[in-house]
Image: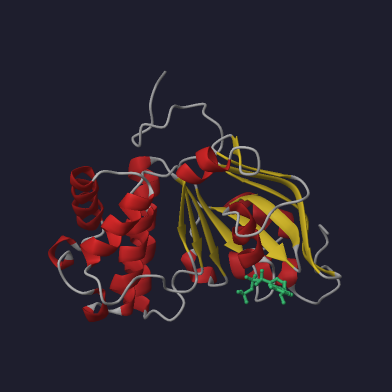
Amino acid sequence: MPELPGSLPLGSAPALTVNHVTHAFGARKALDDVSLSVPTGSFTALLGPNGAGKTTLFSLITRLYDNRTGRIDVLGHDVRRAPAAALSKLGVVFQARTLDLELSVVQNLLYHATLHGMGFAAGRRRALEVLAQAGLADRAGDKVRRLSGGQMRRVEIARALMHRPSLLLLDEPTVGLDIASRAALVAQVRALVAQEGIGVLWATHIIEEITATDRIVVLHRGRIRAEGAHDAVLAQAGAADVSEAFLTLVGDGPDAGAAA
Ligand SMILES: Nc1ncnc2c1ncn2[C@@H]1O[C@H](COP(=O)(O)OP(=O)(O)OP(=O)(O)O)[C@@H](O)[C@H]1O
């Protein structure tokens, strides 16, 4: 079978499928019958305003919360029935920073490698590889505390890639970064999609981060308002650009949430 650059076989399962998932906190539904997919080799932007349900969705995919309705598959593995197989294919960068500031960059990565059952030598080799990919090979021995915010984010992405996941989730990774750091981060992740064929779900409310080759999922008040290729979402919203589509789909006007 032909292979994508990241050695994912063509025709393999999507990196992520979410089918009819609902999640409530008390009486409030944070997610309401949500279905979406992230093909391998795609950059899928999950676009939603504050409170849309993006973090709740990530918490269900990563099994911080248990999905009691519907089904979530990572590369064809049901996260409920086969959590070990599903989580082994999943890399995550959470909204809050989770590096140990007092350890070196490479120590942070090796800690993650150990959690994934990698031996020391293999872990070290892979750490240097992902740091080189992230343009941070020369910072491997530095304490994380000495890095800039943008560099820390890039280390977190490198760490998430240590175990060669097929799906990478990033929850508003550019929050608090300046424009140059934001651009470097987006470029790093787009290169991964192009070169390694992984699927990326990138949660954001920053429209400038989205390009015409992306897939877009618009989430608002826990419901999917649109999903598809960039141009298809614009056509569905009758919009000339993503900003206009976003306002039409999540605004408070008469057309808001027409798909709901
Ligand atoms: N632990 C919780 N307990 C109660 N309600 C919650 C909890 N977590 C989230 N919610 C509610 O669920 C809804 C979705 O929140 P969520 O954090 O998933 O949205 P979000 O799209 O990630 O927002 P943001 O962009 O602000 O991070 C909101 O109404 C929020 O108040």
Q: Estimate the x, y position of residue 147 in percent, counting from the top left.
A: 24, 77
* Side of 155 where 71 appears, left or right: right
* Side of 112 where 236 appears, left or right: right
Q: Estimate the x, y position of residue 185 in percent, counting from the top left.
A: 36, 65
Q: Estimate the x, y position of residue 76 in percent, counting from the top left.
A: 58, 34
123 versus 142 height, above or below: above
> Quadrant location of the N terminus?
top left
40 versus 170 height, above or below: above
Q: Estimate the x, y position of residue 7 in percent, counting from the top left.
A: 36, 31
Q: How is the image coloured?
A: secondary structure
258 versus 161 height, above or below: below
Could you tell me which residue is drawn at 71 percent across and 55 percent down?
A: 226
> Quadrant location of the C terminus?
bottom right
Q: Which residue of the protein is positioned furthest toward the top in this rendering?
A: 1
Could you tell me which residue is drawn at 27 percent across and 79 percent down?
A: 148
* Side of 85 where 37 appears, left or right: right
Q: Compare residues 228 and 22 and report the one nearer the observer.
A: 22
Q: Tell me if residue 220 can be seen.
A: yes
Could you tell me which residue is drawn at 19 percent across and 50 percent down?
A: 124
Q: Quadrant of ligand 1?
A: bottom right
59 versus 70 height, above or below: below
* Side of 91 where 192 appears, left or right: left
